[in-house]
Amino acid sequence: MIAAWPTPAGEEYAVAFDQGRAHRLLVLPAWFDEGNKLRHFTVEVMRRLDGSGIDSFLPDLPGCNESLAPLEQQTLESWRTEASEAAWHFSATHVLAIRAGANIAPDSLPGWRYAPLAGASQLRALLRARVLGSREAGRNEDRDRLLGIGRSEGLELAGYRLGAAMVDGLADAELPAPGQQRDIAQSDIGGPGLWLRAEPDHAPKQADALAAILAMELLA
Amino acid sequence: MANARALFDGDPRMSSQTATNDADTVLRQVLQDVLGLSAERVAAFTPETGLFGHLPELDSMAVAGLLTEVEDRLGIVIEDDEVDGEMLETYGALLAFVRAKRGG
């Protein structure tokens, strides 16, 4: 269930349900804090797809999860390249991009974007959390000024040390055109998005709903 | 800073989907979603119910998510310098802020 895949930065792990079946789904996880909150859900969706006869692969992006690569050295472009390399390595036929994962989904693959989030919106949430946290600690920080510092020196946001190139890339990142990928909104799944939860939680019914949508469309 | 401007303006695709909803209803719904509480628990919130600083799970990341979700659901933009401890301290203060924002 744990596989490895090669990147220019070194070997990374992936959660893999691989039985060499016809449908092979690359799963690009949500990022940062949202990635933690959605990881259980994401793996549960993969487990359900496995039961439906669909292979899936959840790679660690360099700098995330079990990766030993420094997050600070990663950029939007490097993650985009690595997502494509993971697609190639696992011979993916489709992609499921979750939240900000949509920013790096290979446009060569058909598939889905679950509640996609633009890089700029992701950064905005992280900056807002930092400003709020600092204010609580009695420090006044300004979002525009923080962004300026981030673009030139990098920035630590919600415990994640982002390099200048990543901050710069995210600040300008609009959601890419969906191309051959279809967007799935949270309202299609039902219930509140798990990324909203203050504490990580799981909702089996939501995993059922997303897996059912994917399986029905893949196996139709 | 043109980029900063674009970054911090609301995302037009997300706005106003429930803009006709009552601010009180939307705010309770978002708090329910963020805190994972039952509808009954959140319905029992009074203007004096303590939020940020009173509920340990409501950390700055969760508050940031809460504000963003309120913006999206009510079609408003909340600037950082409008956000202070007082406005986040109780349910009543947050609701008053959101109502003023919608009326303004």
Image: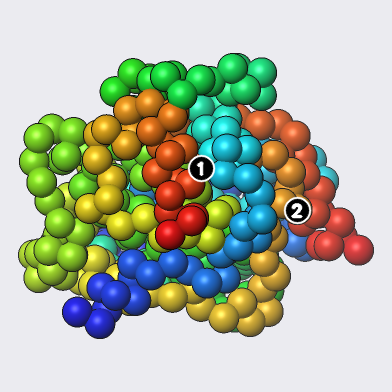
Along the horizontal axis of the image, is A212 left or right of A176?
A: right
* Frontmost residue, A37 versus B63: B63
* Frontmost residue, B77 versus A24: B77
Q: Amino acid at mark 1?
A: Trp
Quadrant for residue B97, please give it: top left
Classify mark 2: residues with Cα within 10 Å, few (<14), some (14-19) or many (20+).
some
- The residue that mark 2 highlights is A188
* Frontmost residue, B34 versus A60: B34
How far across and down, in percent of the image, does residue B45 sit?
53, 20
How far across and down, in percent of the image, does residue A159 sit?
23, 42
Q: Earlier in the sequence, mark 2 or mark 1?
A: 2
Task: Please give the name of the residue rendered at 37% of the width and 55% of the height, measured from the top-left corner.
Answer: B78
How far across and down, in percent of the image, does residue A108 sit?
59, 80
Q: Is residue A6 above or below residue A205?
A: below
Task: Please give the name of the residue rendered at 13% of the width and 69% of the height, measured from the top-left corner.
Answer: A148
Along the horizontal axis of the image, is A207 left or right of B8?
A: right
Question: What secondary structure is found at the residue carrying circle 2?
Answer: helix
Along the horizontal axis of the image, is B53 left or right of B69?
A: left
Residue closest to the far right? A220
Along the horizontal axis of the image, is A170 left or right of A159?
A: right
Chain holding disc 2: A
Q: Amino acid at mark 2?
A: Asp
Q: From where the camera sits, is residue A70 visible?
A: no
- The residue that mark 1 highlights is A195
Q: From where the camera sits, is residue B102 visible?
A: yes
Task: Please give the name of the residue rendered at 68% of the width and 79% of the height, measured from the top-left corner.
Answer: A180
